[in-house]
């Protein structure tokens, strides 16, 4: 973000690569524009290293969309999670061939499972990465948990890492599949595919990442 405005920008060679409303970009960067504004086409050569300025732009786009448009909380750049509220303790998921109603709890309490943590809460979360393979850019989503002792503040301690493993180890593959489906359903927001637009909520957005419906998954979260 630039100066609180809905522009994502990063330095690129001797210029700036930016995503946002064109007139807003011209206003913000006007005094620095010496040779006009031209479109930048992302190519496979920009993606092969699985890092760099293009990935920075993509990660910023995801961060802003998920936190402002999907009301997710961020734990760093690549982990997002949900916490319960007084009105919302769980989220309903239509799951399986029968589309049965399954309640996904936003908080589960554990007692006497980790030395140094008499009790803790586990909250649904996911980690993601962008990975480029064979001319495809993959959004890799792995369900996990974040840990609190008060349902508010995420713990970063060694004990918290152990607590995450406790929460994961008690779940079979089918349960983790259910959490994966929950996150995909949550991110779709009622649409056919996951669409990550910028600025969030703008119609039409000036930039958009669409995750095609060819979803696949591994049997176990890591």
Image (cartoon, rainbow, N blue to C red):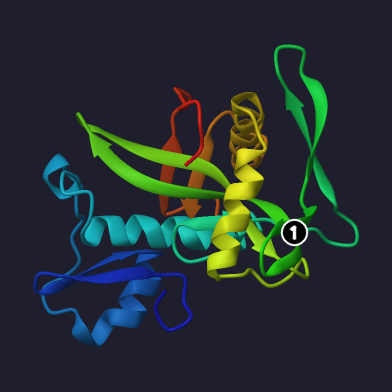
Q: Which quarter of the figure has residue 102?
A: top right
Looking at the image, which residue is at 34% across and 46% down?
130
User: Which residue is at the front of the view, 11 or 177?
Assistant: 177
Q: Position of residue 61 (x, y in %)?
A: 42, 58
Q: Is residue 39 visible?
A: yes
* Rendered position, 66 above or below 140: below
- Secondary structure under badge 1? strand
Q: Quadrant of the N terminus?
A: bottom left
45 vs 126, left or right, is left
Q: Nearer the viewer, residue 91 or 199?
A: 91
Position above or below: 139 against 17? above
Residue extending farthest to the top is 97
Compare residues 215 and 147 and report the one nearer the observer.
Answer: 147
Count of numbered labels shown in the rendering: 1
Q: Quadrant of residue 184?
A: top right
Identify the residue shown where x is 30% and y is 42%.
Answer: 131
* Residue identifier under label 1: 121
Q: Is residue 114 left or right of residue 131?
A: right
Q: Residues within 10 Å of mark 1 (few under 14, many from 20)?
A: many
Relative image position of residue 156 (x, y in whole percent): 55, 70
Residue 217 % position (x, y):
47, 27
Q: Quadrant of residue 101?
A: top right
The answer to whether residue 61 is above or below residue 178 is below
Percent position of residue 152, x then y: 73, 70
Relative horizontal placement of residue 36, taking residue 189 as reference (left or right): left
**Residue 156 against residue 51 in the figure, above or below:** below
121 on left or right of 184: right
In percent of the image, x 61 and y 40: which residue is there? 169
Residue plotted at (64% across, 69% down): 154
């Amino acid at each position: 973000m630039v100066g609180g405005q809905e522009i994502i920008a990063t330095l690129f060679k001797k210029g700036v690569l930016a995503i946002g409303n064109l007139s807003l970009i011209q206003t913000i960067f006007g005094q620095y524009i010496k040779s006009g504004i031209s479109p930048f086409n992302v190519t496979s050569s920009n993606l092969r290293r699985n890092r760099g300025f293009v990935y920075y732009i993509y990660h910023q786009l995801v961060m802003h969309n998920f936190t402002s448009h999907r009301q997710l909380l961020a734990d760093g750049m690549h982990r997002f999670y949900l916490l319960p509220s007084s009105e919302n303790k769980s989220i309903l998921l239509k799951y399986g061939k029968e589309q049965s109603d399954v309640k996904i709890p936003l908080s589960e309490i554990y007692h006497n499972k980790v030395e140094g943590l008499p009790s803790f809460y586990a909250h649904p979360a996911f980690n993601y990465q962008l990975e480029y393979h064979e001319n495809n850019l993959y959004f890799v989503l792995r369900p996990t948990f974040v840990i609190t002792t008060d349902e508010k503040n995420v713990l970063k301690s060694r004990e918290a890492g152990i607590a995450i493993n406790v929460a994961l180890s008690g779940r079979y593959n089918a349960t983790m599949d259910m959490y994966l489906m929950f996150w995909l359903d949550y991110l779709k927001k009622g649409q056919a595919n996951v669409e990550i637009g910028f600025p969030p909520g703008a119609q039409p957005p000036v930039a958009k990442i669409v995750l095609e419906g060819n979803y696949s998954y591994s049997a176990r979260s890591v």
